[in-house]
Amino acid sequence: MTDTPGQGPVTPSGQPQRGYDIARQALEEARARARAEGKQVGRGRSRPVGTGGRLRKRGWTGAGADPWDPQPLGRLMGQVAKRRGWDDNVTTGRLFAQWGTIVGEDVAAHATPERLEDGVLHIRASSTAWATQLRLMSADILRRIAAAMGPNRVRRLRIEGPAGPSWRKGPLHVRGRGPRDTYG
């Protein structure tokens, strides 16, 4: 083989050498150098790349479930959330997103979950009458939440009525009753 200007390596028959032939020749030269250094040559890798030492015992997966099967995205995201410590935030998000289906649309129209802190779910009712009704239904609501989210995610409900109007106006405020002579 010789190099011809402008054509690259040439075979003894005078044809330009292809990329495959060049790669094969480089491989053979590397094997010859390895043999000269006393290394084993031609066996390939002892295990497939990226398996981390795990080898499958059979060539194809069977009919049953195994780690190589595709996994549902929801299950994988749940595992990631647990490993990273996001489990409580994911649970809170699911509870708030599915609130209407968990408690029913009629209750959800008058009750809004505000926050979940240490197993206590804070709920804001649309009126004081609905706040009373929700307090009476609290055992049923807790049972529905446990069925949908899992046990002990929400241990107690704190139901509050609608926020009343504030008499405080402006950035400055005096503690205590303040002047009350404006009513009459």
Image (tube, rainbow, N blue to C red):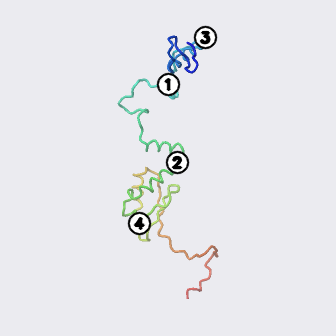
Which of the marked residues, 2 or 3, is nearer the chain's N terminus?
A: 3
Say whether marks 4 and 2 touch (CB < 8 Å).
no
Q: Residues within 10 Å of mark 2 (few under 14, many from 20)?
A: few
Q: Which residue is mark 2?
A: 86
Q: Looking at the picture, how far across and down is residue 155, in whole percent?
A: 47, 55
Say whether marks 2 and 3 touch (CB < 8 Å).
no
Q: The residue tagged with tag 3: helix, strand or loop? A: helix
Q: Quadrant of residue 140?
A: bottom left
Disc 1 versus disc 4: nearer the observer: 1
Q: Which residue is mark 3?
A: 36
Q: Looking at the picture, how far across and down is residue 148, in whole percent?
A: 40, 52
- Distance between the alpha carbons at the discs numbered 1 and 2: 34 Å
Which of the marked residues, 3 or 1, is nearer the chain's N terminus?
A: 3
Question: Identity of the amino acid at label 4?
Answer: His
Which of the marked residues, 4 or 3, is nearer the chain's N terminus?
A: 3
Q: Which residue is mark 1?
A: 48
**Mark number for residue 7?**
none
Q: Which residue is mark 4?
A: 110
Which of the marked residues, 4 or 2, is nearer the chain's N terminus?
A: 2
- Distance between the alpha carbons at the discs numbered 4 and 3: 83 Å
